[in-house]
Amino acid sequence: MGEVRAVIFDWGGVLIDDPAPGLMQFCADALGVPKEIYIKAHRKFTPDFQTGKISEDAFWDAICGELEIPAPKERSLWYPAFKAVYSPKPDMFALARSLQGNGYKTGFLSNTEIPAVRLFLEQKYDMFDVLVFSCIEGAKKPDRKIYELTIERLGVEPQQAVFIDDRLDCIDGANTAGLKTIFFESIEQVKNELHRLGVKST
């Protein structure tokens, strides 16, 4: 029952370079405020943005209200920001495709925002059987229920799934939900750990 049947990938920091530093700088520059000041306001409202509780318009209104500055002229600032810093890791996407070709179910699980989902879908990735976005589901990692939702859609038991992420809190959340986990450090390290778990990745 514990044999691995599915591998679930995080997005930022695993499949792509961590977009956060670039996103913070892009948005700070667009709003004309220091990066450190922007980050403080950003962190205050990000949870609601990432769980779909507020729209992008409401997100910027909240941030600009906090910073006491005018709202951005470009109301869809998050999409161009994400696009500007988007840097895929081809070897990781190739790994997902290889796993899928070897008969494993592949999942994608990300804490992200509606404009970023738009960018993801534009890439037309076809190596994932299940896509789970926090902003659509109304829950985010490390909330147990988003892991349970992902494995339910993959049709596997918790112990039959491996979750890969670069954040320890998200890894801990997956462990709590009963999944096997790999803390991402490098493509080779991930392949080695998958091999250790009996997963054929090539």
Image (cartoon, rainbow, N blue to C red):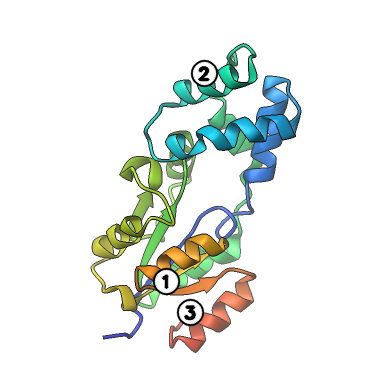
Marks 2 and 1, how far apart at CA: 37 Å
Judging by the rendered image, the residue that carries numbered circle 2 is 61
The amino acid on which the numbered mark 1 sits, given as a three-letter code, is: Asn
Q: Residue at x 48, y 46 (%)?
A: 123
Q: What percent of the width, then of the height, locates residue 119?
A: 49, 39
The residue shown at (43%, 57%) is 142
Relative depth, front residue between 97 and 14: 14
Q: What residue sits 49% from the left and 59% below the top?
A: 10
Q: Is residue 142 left or right of residue 83?
A: left
- Residue 150 in picture, x, y percent from top left: 31, 60
- Foreground: disc 1 or disc 3: 1
Residue 74 appears left or right of 201? right
Amino acid carrying mark 2 in the image: Asp
Residue, far right: 34
Alpha-carbon span between mark 3 and mark 2: 45 Å
Does 200 sit above or below residue 130? below
To which quarter of the image does residue 198 belong?
bottom left
Q: Residues within 10 Å of mark 3 (few under 14, many from 20)?
A: some
On residue 175, which mark appears? 1
| Contact flag, marks 1 and 3 (Cβ < 8 Å) | no
Residue in view at x 49 percent, y 81 percent: 194
* Residue 3 locus on image (x, y percent): 33, 85
Instruction: Determine contact: label 3, label 2, CB under 8 Å.
Output: no
Task: Measure the alpha-carbon separation of dots 1 and 3.
Answer: 22 Å
* Mark positioned earlier in the residue sequence (2 or 1): 2
Q: Check disc 1 and report its element: helix, strand or loop.
A: helix
Instruction: Provide the residue designation for mark 3.
Output: 201
Residue nearer the viewer, 140 or 16: 140
Image height of 40 relative to 137, above or below? above
Amino acid type of disc 3? Ser
The x, y position of residue 112, in whole percent, is 47, 44
